[in-house]
Image (cartoon, rainbow, N blue to C red):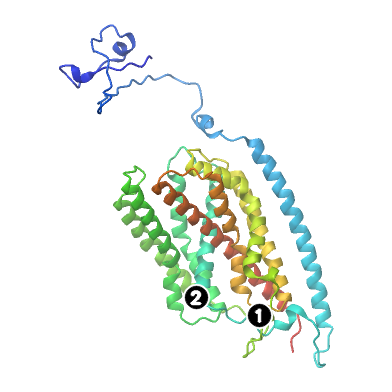
Amino acid sequence: MNPKSYAYENTEDPNCKLTPSEIEEGSTIDLPPIILDQNGNTGVTFTYSVYFIESDTVWATRWDKYLHVFDPKIQWFSLINVSLVVLSLSFIMSHILIRALKNDIQKYNEINLDDDVIDEMGWKLIHGDIFRPPSNPMLLSVLIGSGTQLLVMTITTTFFALFGLLSPSNRGSLSTFMFILYAGFGIVGAFVSATIYKFFQGEDWKLNMILTPVLIPGGLFCLFVFFNFFLIFVNSSGAVPIGTMITIIFIWFIISVPLSCIGSLLAFKRPSIKLPVKVNQIARQIPPQPWYLKTHFMALIAGIFPFGAIAVEMYFIYNSLWFNRIFYMFGFLFFCLLLMLLTTLLVTILLTYFSLCNENYKWQWQSFFISGGISIYIFIHSILISKFQLGGLTSIVLYLGYSCVISLGVGLLCGAVGFISVMFFVLKIYSQIKID
């Protein structure tokens, strides 16, 4: 079919319709060509024809031309490379840490506790303060619960997408499924939040039950509404209507909030986690820490390793979100997610162990920030991938805003993983030593 432009406004019937044969043959068309006005606007009427051509391609494979936009060799090379590095690092770290802990525990248990000891005993000296509640235990428990909720939602979504149950051909299915899962797993987040709050010896359980389903989701919704105003201001078709926002709020308070209350009640009715050692009434003074054991420096160091496990996948995800590419490689994403979680767990435990050996017993917030250090590199990666070619205030605000939300979301997820792993690590090692 050859494209042609006709001045329909010059005919007596401006709504005249031409048949496909008339457009293709052009013999029966008696219309002048359209001439664009250089000094003003020119109205142009567009028409098109649709021809049905039967295809032998199976329906299940018709999306392959659109999905195969990335080179799978790059994915396989990156996956194998990162896997070997992570597994080697995991083996070395686990071997060193387990061997050091066995030697420490053996030496400590051989000491006669009746004698006047102790000379440079490291992490064992702070057994009376290791389970001292941290500052702002309410906020930390809510953050851990929200991070766990994000973690379970992410693993479940990528697992279902791995088996092709969330096809890209069904537009919006992935985001809808993620929102429903996030709302449904509110019971898991509230249960973890309440359990951690009880572990911190918190007493205001009602406030914890209210803040867990409201604080983080409420903040995300406020940011979403704020970004949506920019889309409305530029008359974007991507702006979310007010009816959809009301529906989201309705679903959240009908599904997630009641489930969160149930999770909190179940956690508070359970017995608290038993501490292996007693907490001293007077807090021990923490000696000056070297610069390499400062929390912000350890967060910068720890964030490199888990980010390396998902750096390539983050590149493809950002191409899918911002450059109109279709992301379909959920198998690679699921495996890289597991590598990221494993790396976060090991690095956080190792750095926390070094901090404990230097008699710093404030591991709660420290483990959360150390494991959440990946968010720094995700945000820097999003800035670099844009190549600083953002035009207009709206584009800058939306790109930087949503990149910040994604970075903080991944940091919150990894922060929950790091804290929970360190908590069980601390409970385990202090239950192995003899305390008088």
**Which one is in front, 348 or 275?**
348
Q: Residue at x 67, y 40 (%)?
A: 76
Where residue 354 appears, as percent x and y from the top left, is 72, 71
Please identify the quarter of the rendering in which residue 371 is found. Answer: bottom right
Question: What quarter of the picture does the C terminus occupy?
Answer: bottom right
Where residue 429 appears, as percent x and y from the top left, is 72, 75
**Which one is in front, 52 or 8?**
8
> Which residue in the protein does label 2 denote?
138
Where residue 19 appears, as percent x and y from the top left, is 28, 15
Can I make out residue 142 in this image? yes
> In the image, which disc is placed on residue 130?
1
Q: Which of the two labelled residues, at mark 1 and mark 2, occupies the earlier sequence position?
A: 1
Q: Residue at x 20, y 22 (%)?
A: 15
Q: Residue at x 78, y 72 (%)?
A: 101
Secondary structure of the residue carrying numbered label 2: helix
Left or right: 275 in relation to 30: right
Left or right: 245 in relation to 261: left
